Every structure is written in structure tokens, then in C-alpha cells.
Amino acid sequence: HIFNDLIVATTYAGESLHESLLTDDIRAKALAALTAVHEAGVAHRDVLLRNFVMDATGAVRIIDFAQAKTNASHRDFQKDRDAFRSVFSISDSRGRHRD
């Protein structure tokens, strides 16, 4: 939740995507999570696999908003999306599996 530039986050237990096999379904869920953050006007600014976790229900969530920016600009969002594409394509080259 966002309150006047203060982000309040919930603690989630789950496995980092850094340790997971990345399927197309997981990628889609991760992108949906990032899109939801952007729709709330927040740029994450630290898009790394370790900052995406999957809980026991299979939901993918973003964690670690220490570098996040509220009232973000289009450029901030684009940097997040570029980082997302880079991080998820690098994970493929490290031997992660795709569906």
C-alpha cells in the first residue's frame, strides 16, 4: 500500500525465483506483478530474480522496495521493464528451463 510516498509492504514467505526453474507461466506471473506495481504508480528500481518470490499457492510477488520510487515517470517504468527483460533472458542463458 502507498501512503504519501511511504510504501507499506507485507511479509511473504516463499521461494525466490532465483532458485526456481523459470517457466513461461512463472514469467507471466512475474510480469503481472511488476505491471501491478507500475499501475500503482511505483517503479521498483531493483528488478532482480531474487526480488520475486513464489508463495505456496503459486502466486508470484515482488519484494524489497528499498529503492522504489513513488509517482514514477514513464522512463522509470521503462527502466524496470528493460531490467525485467534482461534478467529473465539472462536466466535462460544460465540453463533455466522454458516451457
Image (cartoon, rainbow, N blue to C red):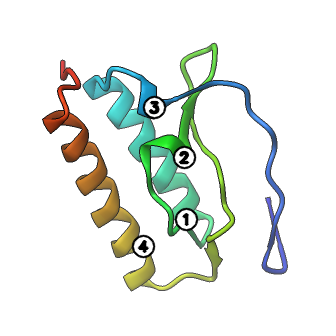
Q: Residues within 10 Å of mark 1 (few under 14, many from 20)?
A: many
Q: Quadrant of the C terminus?
A: top left
Q: Nearer the viewer, mark 3 or mark 1?
A: 3
Q: Residue furthest front?
A: 94
Q: Say which residue label 2 marks.
A: 51
Question: Does dot 2 land on a helix, a strand or a loop?
Answer: helix
- The answer to whether residue 48 is left or right of residue 92 is right
Q: Residues within 10 Å of mark 4 (few under 14, many from 20)?
A: many
Please give left or right for residue 8 compared with residue 40 in the image: right
Q: Earlier in the sequence, mark 4 or mark 3?
A: 3
Q: Position of residue 67 (x, y in %)?
A: 62, 71
Residue visible at 28% across and 65% down?
82
**How many C-alpha atoms fall within 10 Å of the one at disc 2: few (<14), some, or many (≥20)?**
some
Residue 77 tag number: 4
| Structural distance between the alpha carbons of marks 2 and 4 | 16 Å
Contact flag, marks 1 and 2 (Cβ < 8 Å): yes
Q: CA distance from mark 4 to mark 3?
A: 21 Å
Task: Identify the mark nearer the N-term, 4 or 1.
Answer: 1
- Between 6 and 95, the one lying in front of the other is 95
Mark 4 or 1: in front is 1
Q: Nearer the viewer, mark 1 or mark 2?
A: 2
Marking on residue 44: 1
Residue at 54% over, 18% down: 58
Q: Is residue 11 above or below residue 77?
A: above
Name which residue type carries label 2.
Asn
Q: Nearer the viewer, mark 4 or mark 3?
A: 3
Residue at numbered disc 3:
17
